Amino acid sequence: MKQIFLLTSLFMLFAACDSSQESKDAADQNELAKDSMDIKIQDPHSFSKPNEAVVRHLSWKAKVDFEKKIIIATADYTIENLSGTSEIIFDTKELSIDSVQVDGKTISLYALASEPDPILGTYLSIPIQENTKQVAISYKTSPSAEALQFLDPEQTTGKKSPFLFTQSQAIMARSWIPSQDSPGIRFTYDAEVSVPADMMAVMSAENPTERNATGVYNFKMDQAVPSYLVALAVGDLVYKEIGEETGVYAEPEVIEDAVFEFADMQDMVDTAEALYGPYRWGKYDVIVLPPSFPFGGMENPRLTFATPTIIAGDRSLTALIAHELAHSWSGNLVTNVNWEDIWLNEGFTVYFENRIMEEIYGKDYANMLAILSHKDLVEEVEDFMNTGRAADTRLKVDLKGRNPDDGLSSVPYDKGFYFLKLIEETVGREKWDAFLKQYFNEFAFQVMNTKTFLNYLDENLLADSSNWMSTIGVEEWVYGEGIPDNIPVPTSTKFEEVDNQLVLWRRGKKTTELNVKSWSTPQWLYFIRSLDDELNLSQMEQLDTAFDFTHSGNREIQAAWFTKVIPNNYIIADIEAENFLVLVGRRKFLTPIYKAYLKSEFGRERALEIYEKARPNYHSVSRETIDEVLNFES
Ligand SMILES: [Zn+2]
């Protein structure tokens, strides 16, 4: 690949991706005390040196070209030269730079071909003066930009218009906006985005609720956010209000189902505020994306991006909305300083999500979700232990030289959740809730790292009793491998009911005679996951005849079922699994189902046959993971 560097007569740039340069950069990244309460902004995944010169505001002007599948844009930054340095550094990936202006003056560009770092991309060094206030970069994205997914009309529900969405987390913002692409660096932004006249654009900002005839949309984001929370979606979109401060964007064909499914959204916002203080972002809306969206949801501020696979028709999968909403506090408000501390974003969010679910749907329901999360954790930790990745079972992980995506396992989410749950149970809910509310308030719009959090926890909570620290075993939980013995796993009478029916079924009771009346989705998921790993054809047929898991309208149930029965060579599920894999791009489902194929007699060949069809529909995030699972070379 070819990459553009800037060279000017004032400043010479040397090999950006040379490892000695990288380690020097890391050493150079000292404190950015002004923004971060003395937390060092050290980020192994960004070239920028925010302690020297840092961005404060972005004015982004862009045109989306659906034919070429690129964005043509100017990123006009207000910057601050903190140390009197002679350069400001941006992260870029596969961007083609057309021109650069410094304080309104075009500077000369010399192209320099160099091998970019395959993970980090390339750094862009722009010469500045001590009093430089503004740097504007005009550029085009690449058709293969990692963050962007351009969909053809056939890949949408309406099949009339194309669609574009971005996914910036973790380090993909740099593939569509040259940025100081680290979660520790926040800036405000405004934008003017031009799209075809019959389409609507929305961002993680103040958004339009109606289309306009010109196709030009203006956005404003007055709260400072890190680059991974800058987001854009463009499509045949309509908006519908749910509550006073909540609403949904979706394709017209999906909007009514979405409004029905997310009816509890306003209630969730009110509940979250009652728990941990005010929601600070103005409106809270959700956009339902086409099914290729690689994640369940992305917590883009003011506008959660969500997969349509949570629309089950019975409001049973909306814990995901509670999760993304909770990020408005944990993550978006108090932000992990880099991706090695991601448990501070995700563990807190799973905890907060569970509390929202408990308030709205009851303790029993929240406990069921917690037990399922425990199952996920145990399975993944076991897998890591058996595959030489024991170090990745620590809450604080080491991601140097690796893609931060490697850190996205159930460890930061579920082990993080159980760590916080253990603290709650040790100190009592009242004290814990007061502490957490104070924490979100005190560190609002700031960064956090593991060490600072642990100090704060000790000083403001655990110091109240001499033995809490050791009862909990804080060090072991955060820095140790595996799952500590004192993990507080809840029990659920609802799951006991499922266990009882499973015992009866194993003893020969007919599937149709099992007492499954009024079972909820978590109970069905628990039922399927608790089935023996080895099932014979007659057992699978009986279950399917009675419950039709293969054709369930609930994607979670379908995915759990395929994962269970494909290793048992259940041919009836094979075609439906293929349809599922071709339509849905949500990685959480894809990975276990493709792995299930590898364990089956269908084999790798069948998995590859499906993947060849499905792969063009996947976002780069999912492609990268499944390429690896299947040893696929494109
Ligand atoms: Zn999350």
Image: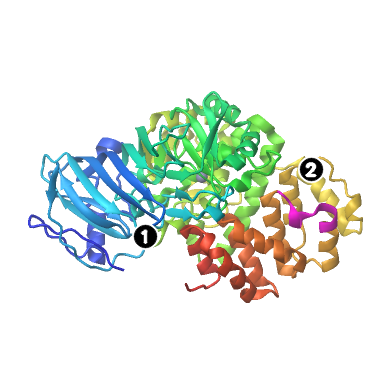
Q: Is mark 2 on a helix, strand or loop?
A: loop
Residue 48 lies, with reference to residue 104, above or below; the image says: below
Q: Is residue 489 visible?
A: no
Q: Nearer the viewer, residue 460 or 416?
A: 416
Q: Residue at x 21, y 60 (%)?
A: 5
Q: Residue at x 91, y 55 (%)?
A: 510
Chain part drawn in magenta: 544-553
Give how far across and how far down residue 3 sits, in percent. Answer: 26, 64
Amino acid type, mark 1:
Lys
Mark 2 CB within 8 Å of ligand 1: no
Q: Is 610 colored magenta in this rendering?
A: no
The numbered dot on residue 519 is 2
Q: Which residue is drawn at 58% across and 40% down?
A: 252
Q: How many labels does the image show?
A: 2
Q: Which of marks 1 and 2 is in front?
A: 2
Q: Can residue 572 be seen in this view?
A: yes
Q: Residue at x 53, y 64 (%)?
A: 615
Q: Is the magenta stretch mostly helix, strand or loop?
A: helix
User: How many residues crowd around disc 2 within 10 Å: few (fewer than 14), some, or many (20 or more)?
Assistant: few
Q: Is mark 1 on a helix, strand or loop?
A: loop
The numbered dot on residue 400 is 1
The numbered dot on residue 131 is none
Give how far across and how far down residue 97 sits, in percent. Answer: 24, 56
Give how far across and how far down residue 395 sits, in percent. Answer: 48, 51
* Tags 1 and 2 touching, CB below 8 Å: no
Looking at marks 1 and 2 on the same chain, the residue that comes earlier in the sequence is marked by: 1
Give how far across and how far down residue 586 sits, in percent. Answer: 57, 54
401 with respect to 432 (left or right): left
Residue 158 lies, with reference to residue 457, above or below; the image says: below
Amino acid type, mark 2:
Trp
